[in-house]
Structures are given as structure tokens and as C-alpha cells.
Amino acid sequence: MSAALGHALRDQRREMRVFQSRIVLSGLFILIAFGLLVARFTWLQVVQREYYHTLAEQNRISVVPVVPNRGIITDRNGEILAANFSAYTLEITPSKVSNVERAIDDLSEVIEVSPRDRRRFKKLQEESKNFESLPIRTRLTEEEVARFAVSRFRFPGFEIKARLFRSYPQGEVASHAIGYIGRINDADVKRIDSQGNTTNYKGTDHIGKLGIEGAYERELHGLTGSEQVEIDAGGRAIRSLSRNEPHSGNNLVVTLDLQLQKVAEAAFQDYRGALVAIDPTNGDVLALVSKPGFDPNLFVDGIDPVNWDALNNSPDKPLNNRALRGQYPPGSTIKPFLGLAALETKKRTPEFSISDPGFFALPGVTHRYRDHKPDGHGSVNLHKAIVVSCDTYFYGLANDMGVDAIHRFLTPFGFGARTGIDIEGELGGLQPSSDWKWQRYKQKWYAGDTVSVGIGQGYWLVTPLQLAAATATLANGGTVVHPRLLKAVQDSKTLETRELAAPTGETIPLKPEYLQLIRNAMVDVTKPGGTAARAGANAPYTIAAKTGTAQVIGMKQGEKYDEKRVKEAHRDHAVFIAYAPADNPKIAIALLVENGGHGGSTAAPIAREVFDFHLLKKKPAVKQKLGDDETASD
């Protein structure tokens, strides 16, 4: 019994020791845990305070970019070409909507969503990131906004926003010169990143794409601001805490005369073509026409596939800027320049004459290069050759000069090179030479190639802009003209307008007496007996001009061209250059009417309307269809 009692006592002592050790261990564990907790609190509250304070503030405060107002564009007389207006837009963030198509179907029960809206949204969705906010409806009325607000709980991921929209009140007028804005795509993002301008485009959906809108994007866009906004748990703004105001884009004044532009575009009637009118004293582009044009308003919200296909696949190519990118043979409009070259290089004198049999043939060659007048023009000197556009005279002249001498003389006038106009997309044309042909085709230059050069055919290619600049250079006596579209910039902060200095060009050394001879001949082109008599009829001012016909298809030896038997797409282009008044030029023009036939009957009347409006402020009267009253051929 005593042994059993001792054993029990020994167990109690042991249990007490175990219990005490457990107490100690538990106390140590609690102490260590408490220490770790204190250390963690110290780390979070002291060491990491700023970091977590920032995170907390970010959960409560959102920094929202404030997009600047885009600068407006006006013509030289203050008429608006591009402006902004505020409107409500309904946007979807696709990543927040489980089934976008079904959500749009449900939305259409509250707000009208047209098939065009759906097509445009689908196109934008294909081009954009899934998390971006995309417009499904733009320019909502107050009633539509109210209807949506009542049912907003049904449409998570949908949001009404007030945005500025670009507007082009003139529609198609001057569309190729002004350009348009469109939604920023991947290529635009790369360009913005490469320029280190990413921050300035936060919150911006659109960017200038073509024309003035694209070339002067930096001036027009402005500087993006920011706003600190307190938000609730649902992400909705409660109040504004601070605001860094954006700086609006600068307003631009362009050189175009809107009313002159309208007259020029209307004068083309249903023809395709291009016209460029330049002030020869400073290079201001007064009108830049490419027909047909397009409505830039279609691109502002994102063009829908139907309209895009209509523009992109049209056989008339309305998106092609013919004034800058159309490359055509200059035809006989090159003859005044060749005549001046012949005088300056002593290859011809004013008195030198030929007897024109109606064709030209190289020595020892049976092939005949025909004149447009089969029986010839009789005795022809340089003055008459320009007035009646005698091909035979210029065949021989080109052959005597040689293509490389022609190339050297005409290069300073800008042929074969871009003019440097201040919008993108210009092509440089082609002024042929023997070196060019060898480099391009690995073939030597033949005398027959030179003969074709003499009447602006063969390998020759010019753009209407290039031809207009060369004509302006001829008009002002040899000072090279560099065309420009931007005339002045109005600062959005100070509202001060800064006139831009006109680019200065070098002067081509030309003898005044030779210039006067060419000018006199070009004036007589617009008088009875000249190829542009229709353009000069009853004009109260003098016009110096030259008509041209640019062949679209070649003709076989002895084959006679019959416009009525040729497909419209294969008919000759009508070309025309002119400046007026001839003794004190204020405007120089180059224009081309695609498949228009003769320059004197189709192109020259267009120029006359432009001259009358610019010089006399005379609006065109009701007129007959272009080409109905044909005059002498060129």
C-alpha cells in the first residue's frame, strides 16, 4: 500500500513538472508570437507607412487624365474648316461585359442602336484592346441620356461620357488638304512611344491621320492635364480633390481660300482630277483640289465597314490625293519650259523657224512622230510653236538639246523631286535622264526616247502640285516656289497669332528677254488662234497659259485617235497650266482632268472660273458641260 502511495506521489511531482514546462513553453510561444505581431505592426505602421498610405489613397483617390481641347483650323479668311463640339457618348468596356452582343441587344430596347452603330463598334473592337472603352452610340440626346440613367443598373460595363467630337463643317470640301482624325491604332501608339509623348496621350482616343490634321498633330493636340478624384467602393467619382488644367491645342490658320476652293471643286463637275492654285509671290497654296473627295466626318467616330468598303474599293479612288500623289505625263504643258531651256542654252534663237510637214523623223529612220495637225502648221518659230502647240517643233528641239541637257536645265524648277509641301504623302514624279534609264532598266538611252520627252510624254511623270510650283516659279521670274499650307498659328494661352515666314527659294538665273518671249507666247495661247482661246475669251485681265494632253494609252504608227471610240478610262488626260494677271501674277495654277481629252476644252474653262473668282470675286454662271465646246487641240 505504501509503495502504491509513493508511486502516486512521484506521478504528481512529475505531472507538476510537465505542467510547469508546458506553461513556460506556452508563455514563450505567446511572447514570441506577440513579439512577432509587434514587429509586424511596427514594420507596417512605421517602416512601410508611406507605401501603404499611398496604396490606400490610390484605392480612395483616382488620378484621371483631362484631355485638352483640340485646336481649330480656319482658312486664310477665318472660315472654319475643322472645329469641336461637345456631346454625350455611350461606351462599353468589353472586358467588363460577359456577353457583349446580348448586352447590346438589351441596350437597344432602351436606346436605339442602328446597324451602322453595330458595324462601327465591331470594327473598333477588332482594332482595340479588350479593356478599352469603346463607343457604341455617339451624340446622344438629353432624353436618351435620361432613359439610360434610369436603367443603368442593368448594364454593368456601360457608361455615359461627355466628350469633344471633331467636326468638319465643310464636308468633302478641301478634305485631302485638311485630312481627318481617327482612333489611335497600334501604329500610332508605336509612333507616340518613339517620340516620348505617351503621357500626353493618356485618355486620348484620337489622333490626326492625314493632311493638316496629321502633319501638325503636335500643335493641334495640346497638353493633357490631370484631376485627382475621390471615388467610392463602386469606382464612381464622389468629388474632385485637385486639378491640373490641360492646355488646349493651338489654332491653325491655313493658306487655303475656302470660297476659292469651293469654286474650283464645283468647276470639275463630275470629272475626276486635281487642281493646285499657288500665290507665286510666297508659295501659299490657295486651293488644293483632288476630285472626288471624301467626307472626313465619317472617320471621327470610327468609320463603319460599309462606308470604308465604298471609299476604299471605289474605282474613282476618292481616298487618293491626286494633287500630291497622282503622277501623270505633263504633255504639252512642258513646252514653255523647254522653249526657255532652248533659248538659255543657245539651241534656239527667237527667229529660228522650221517648216512643219505634220511629222518629225530622225535621220535615217522611217518612223514618223506625228503632230496633232496632220497637215502641219507651216512655218513655225518658237513663239508660234507654243501658241499652237506644234509638236513637230519640239520633237526637233528635244533631239537637238539631248535629254541630259534638258534634265540639267529643268531640275531647278523642281521636276523629278518633291516640292516639300508641309503635309505628308507627296510623290516626286519622274524627270528622265540617260543615267536614270540605265540605273532603272540597264538600257541605254535612245534618240527616240528624247523625241517623246519633247512633248512631255515617254518616261515623264509629274504631280499637279509639282507642275503648279514650277508654273509659279516661271510666273515670278525664276524664284523657286516652295508650296505651303500653314499660314499662321494662334497660341491657345495668349491668343496671339504668329504669322509664319514664307519659305525662301533660290533664284534661277534667267534672261528677262527670254522670259518675256515665253510669257508673250503663253498670253497668245489664250487669244484667238491659241489652244486656250476659250479660257481667255473676254477676260478683263491677261492670262499666260499652256494646254496639254497626256496620253493614257499608246497609239500605233498611222493609227488615228478617236475619243468617241475609246473607253473612257483610256481617254487622254486634259492638262493645263496658267498664271494671271500675266504682267503681275497673283495666282498660278496647274490642273489635270482625268480622261478629260483636250486641255483647251476641258481643263482651261476650270482655270478661268478660278481666275475670275480670285481676281474679280466673280462667281461662276450656269455653264455647259465641260468639253462640249472643243477648241484647237494641243
Image: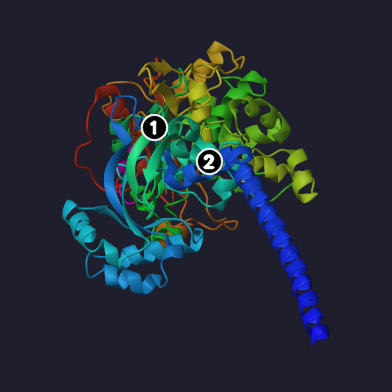
Residue type at mark 2 is Thr
Res 583 quadrant in image: top left
Residue type at mark 1 is Ser
Disc marking residue 217: none
> Which residue does the image show at 35% across and 74% down from the upper left?
102
| Residue 503 makes an appearance in the image | yes
Residue 343 drawn at (x, y percent): 61, 20
The magenta stretch is 264-271
Residue 490 drawn at (x, y percent): 38, 22
Q: Nearer the viewer, residue 100 or 266?
A: 100
Count of labels in the image: 2
**Identity of the residue furthest to the left in this view:** 143
Q: Nearer the viewer, residue 355 or 118?
A: 118
Q: Nearer the viewer, residue 110 or 614?
A: 110
Of badges 1 and 2, the one in the foreground is: 2
Residue 139 drawn at (x, y percent): 26, 51
Mark 2 highlights which residue? Answer: 54
Mark 1 highlights which residue? Answer: 242
| Residue 462 makes an appearance in the image | no
